Image (cartoon, rainbow, N blue to C red):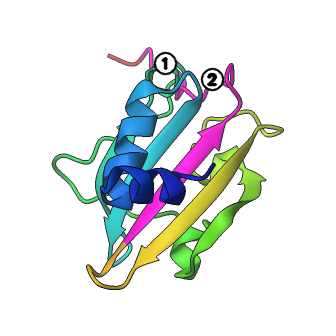
Amino acid sequence: MQLSDKSDAFGVSLTAAALRWVKSTHASAVLILSRDGFMNWAVPSDRALKNGAFFRTKGAPREIPAASVTAASGSERIGQTLAATVWFPSADLNATVKELTVVCDNYGSTLTLLCLSPNEKVWAPWSTEA
């Protein structure tokens, strides 16, 4: 069953269903809402947060990576696998992420779901500079 089926079954929006799934899943996933090429907000699952897969969206605008499916401005509901470094520059070069996108024309926004391997760490290197 897909998230769109769940949203229909419970009479909620796709965004609400996706948020509920991300907050309750054991998978490593990040849900992002963007407009005009910039992130409005991003919500990681608990596992993604522990693995360093999250985005700070408060403060300075956070741009959507140019090599991402989301930047191509089309819906990709089945998902496309790409290098995790597209979204997480510090990820292992062999790591991948599955990116699913839904363009919400009514609201002028794009909903993106990133799914990583459960144990894939994407933390940026620790800086020892003072």
Residue at horizontal 43%, vertical 53%?
9
- Decide if residue 129 is on the left or right side of residue 88: left
Tell me which amino acid carries mark 2. Lys
Q: Position of residue 8 (x, y in %)?
A: 42, 60
Residue at horizontal 60%, vertical 53%?
2
Q: Position of residue 79 (x, y in %)?
A: 69, 60
Q: Position of residue 72 (x, y in %)?
A: 58, 80
- Decide if residue 112 is on the left or right side of residue 77: left
The single residue placed furthest to the bottom in the displayed view is 105
Tell me which amino acid carries mark 1. Trp
Q: Which mark is residue 126?
A: 1
Looking at the image, is 1 positioned above or below residue 54? below
Looking at the image, is 103 positioned above or below residue 15? below
Stretch of the chain drawn in magenta? 110-128
Q: Nearer the viewer, residue 75 or 16?
A: 16
Q: Earlier in the sequence, mark 1 or mark 2?
A: 2
Question: Residue 65 colored magenta?
Answer: no
The single residue placed furthest to the right in the displayed view is 94
Crowding around mark 1 (Cα neighbors within 10 Å: few <14, some 14 to 19, many 20+) is few
Q: Position of residue 67 (x, y in %)?
A: 63, 68
Q: Nearer the viewer, residue 21 or 5?
A: 5
Question: Residue 124 colored magenta?
Answer: yes
Q: Residue at label 2?
A: 121
The single residue placed furthest to the front in the displayed view is 9
Q: Nearer the viewer, residue 7 or 121?
A: 7
Circle 1 SS class: loop
Residue at horizontal 57%, vertical 29%?
28
Looking at the image, is 39 positioned above or below residue 51? below
Predominant SS along the magenta part: loop
Circle 2 SS class: loop
Task: Give the total number of marks visible in the rendering.
Answer: 2
